[in-house]
Image (spheres, rainbow, N blue to C red):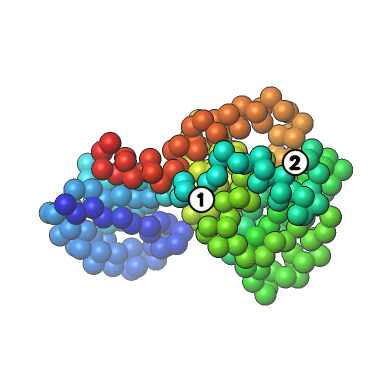
């Protein structure tokens, strides 16, 4: 049986130019049509990518479905999460009662991580802390380096396995820019999140209350939303409950694999 997995969407494979759109619809649409004769299903890994399959490549809706990316459960040490939490916080001098945010990836302008860093610096008195991991590209150093300090820590690059303990140590994941699989990895660790809303293209990240999707992103907006969660503990606990009891399973690769074969 043939299954097709596709990752193109309107951001990473834009079709703004009429000529490019026509080429994709004819050239790749023809390939998709031929594959449709044999494929059981075309999987889009986000709602946007399912839509792209249907509207750009011309794949019939009954042949498409959503199969999300996720996290590798064998690296999510859920039973020892409190020990992991304490160890990482101790390593970076973060108090036990501090509200810890995690973000990272390729730190370029499109990720908006510099805006998040700016927001957290302004929340210092509220005991809000931020751990940033990843590759800081040269053009962003002038924006990010001055913001690194007492409540914003830069931990450097973490590989795909090492990142899981950092997610477990955090209270909130914030990814205010372009999408990466880190969104789903964070959700597989059972923590709430704040994400940029791309016209509903990544709505799958919200499993019923674990995530906030923001249409507009700025340092002020991020600071406001984070401050609300820090202050409104009931609302935060509700998000955390959905993250732990629903999203963690939804984004587990073990469960995703079961769904892929109809179990």
The total of numbered circles placed on residues is: 2
Considering the numbered disc 1 on the image, is that residue within a helix, a strand or a loop? Answer: helix
Which label's residue is closer to the chain start, 1 or 2?
1
Nearest to viewer (mark 1 / mark 2): 1
Q: As drawn, is 89 to the left or to the right of 38?
A: right
Residues 97 and 144: in front is 97
Q: Can you see residue 110?
A: no
- List the single residue furthest toward the bottom: 138
Q: As drawn, is 85 to the left or to the right of 200?
A: right
> Which percent across, then down, holds residue 169?
66, 45
Mark 2 crowd level (few <14, some 14–19, many ≥20, 10 Å Cα): some
Q: Is residue 162 above or below residue 190?
A: below
Q: Which mark is residue 99?
A: 2
Q: Is residue 62 above or below residue 112?
A: above
Please give the name of the residue rendered at 67% of the width and 43% of the height, measured from the top-left corner: 83
Q: Which mark is residue 75?
A: 1
Q: As drawn, is 172 to the left or to the right of 220?
A: left
Please give the name of the residue rendered at 29% of the width and 44% of the height, measured from the top-left corner: 260
């Amino acid at each position: 049986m043939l299954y097709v997995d596709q990752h193109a969407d309107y951001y990473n494979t834009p079709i703004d130019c009429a000529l490019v759109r026509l080429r994709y619809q004819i050239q790749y649409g023809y390939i998709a049509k031929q594959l449709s004769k044999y494929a059981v299903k075309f999987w889009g890994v986000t709602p946007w990518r399912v839509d792209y399959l249907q509207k750009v490549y011309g794949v019939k809706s009954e042949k498409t479905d959503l199969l999300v990316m996720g996290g590798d459960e064998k690296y999510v040490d859920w039973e020892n999460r409190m020990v992991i939490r304490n160890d990482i916080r101790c390593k970076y001098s973060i108090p036990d009662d501090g509200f810890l945010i995690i973000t990272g990836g390729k730190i370029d302008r499109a990720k908006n991580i510099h805006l998040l860093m700016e927001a957290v610096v302004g929340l210092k008195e509220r005991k809000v802390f931020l751990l940033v991991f990843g590759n800081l590209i040269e053009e962003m150093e002038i924006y990010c380096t001055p913001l690194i300090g007492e409540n914003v820590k830069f931990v450097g690059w973490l590989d795909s396995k090492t990142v899981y303990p950092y997610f477990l140590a955090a209270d909130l994941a914030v990814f205010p820019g372009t999408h990466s699989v880190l969104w789903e990895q964070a959700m597989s660790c059972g923590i709430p999140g704040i994400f940029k809303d791309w016209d509903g293209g990544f709505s799958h990240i919200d499993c019923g209350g674990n995530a906030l999707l923001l249409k507009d992103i700025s340092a002020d907006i991020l600071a406001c939303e984070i401050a609300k969660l820090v202050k409104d503990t009931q609302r935060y606990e509700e998000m955390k409950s959905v993250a732990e009891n629903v999203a963690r399973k939804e984004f587990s690769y073990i469960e995703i694999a079961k769904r892929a074969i109809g179990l």
